[in-house]
Image (spheres, grey):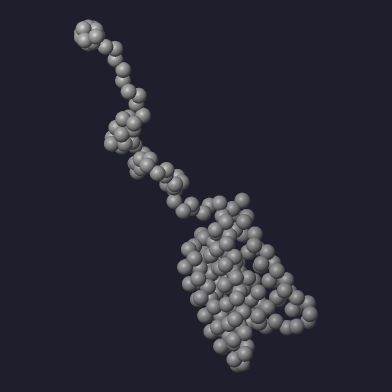
Amino acid sequence: MEYVRNWLLPALLAVVQVSVWPGLTLLRGAAVEAPQLAVGLAVTASAVAVLGVRRRFPVAAALTIEGMLAAGLVVPDEALLAAMVAGVVALYSVAVRRPAGTAVLVATVLTGSAVLRSLLVYDSPVDIGGEALASFALFAGTVGAGRSRAAGSPDAAPPSANWRGPRPYGSPRPPRNGTASPVNCTTSARITSPPSWSPRTPHAASATAGRN
């Protein structure tokens, strides 16, 4: 079952990517150059393969897929749809399975990489700024969603495994190693044990009768 969960989404992304590009492009009669086709298919195959191990290596998967998006300099944007979605899914896995600081750091790296790519593609500062804002909003929302999922996950560790609730005032402190303390046992015995009673001895009874 775990194997199916890991590879179902990558397989669907690969099918959708091939259907959109180059499939839909070729159906419309547009030409696809051989170098672009080779690079696009290689990026798609690599991205979905890396996405399949996102649960075991989420940080490495997110950074590796982000590096593959540099192929956008030689292929059209529609050829990288699967890789873009795979990068967001990998970042989500980072936010769920790694600490918040790690997720924020990875999201910052992805945002900076997106800005660098936009500097190489666009000439207008407006386009570059819009790309930066869109990347920031996307990655921030992904990290927020992942952290919310991590907080509500039943696998999340409780604040303290030894927490037993508030201790009543005046009660002895529970031992750390699970064994009773000699001092606590003695004190408890003095408080809880009923007073001992013994009958009067004959000598004491006669002395009392003589005084009367």
Residue 46, x across and y down, in percent: 58, 69
Q: Residue 164 versus residue 146: which sits nearer the camera?
A: 164
Residue at 26% across / 11% down in the picture? 200
In this view, 191 is above or below 163: above
The C terminus: image quadrant: top left
Q: Is residue 194 left or right of residue 27?
A: left
Q: Residue furthest right?
A: 28
In this view, 78 is above or below 142: below
Residue 177, x across and y down, in percent: 34, 41
Residue 3, x across and y down, in percent: 59, 54
Q: On the image, which quarter does residue 27 sit in?
A: bottom right
- Tally of numbered discs: 0
Q: On the image, which quarter does residue 81 sit in?
A: bottom right
Does the rendering let one see residue 54? no
Residue 145, x across and y down, in percent: 59, 65
Q: Residue 182 versus residue 91: which sits nearer the camera?
A: 182
Residue at 59% across / 78% down in the picture? 135
Q: Is residue 86 left or right of residue 112?
A: right
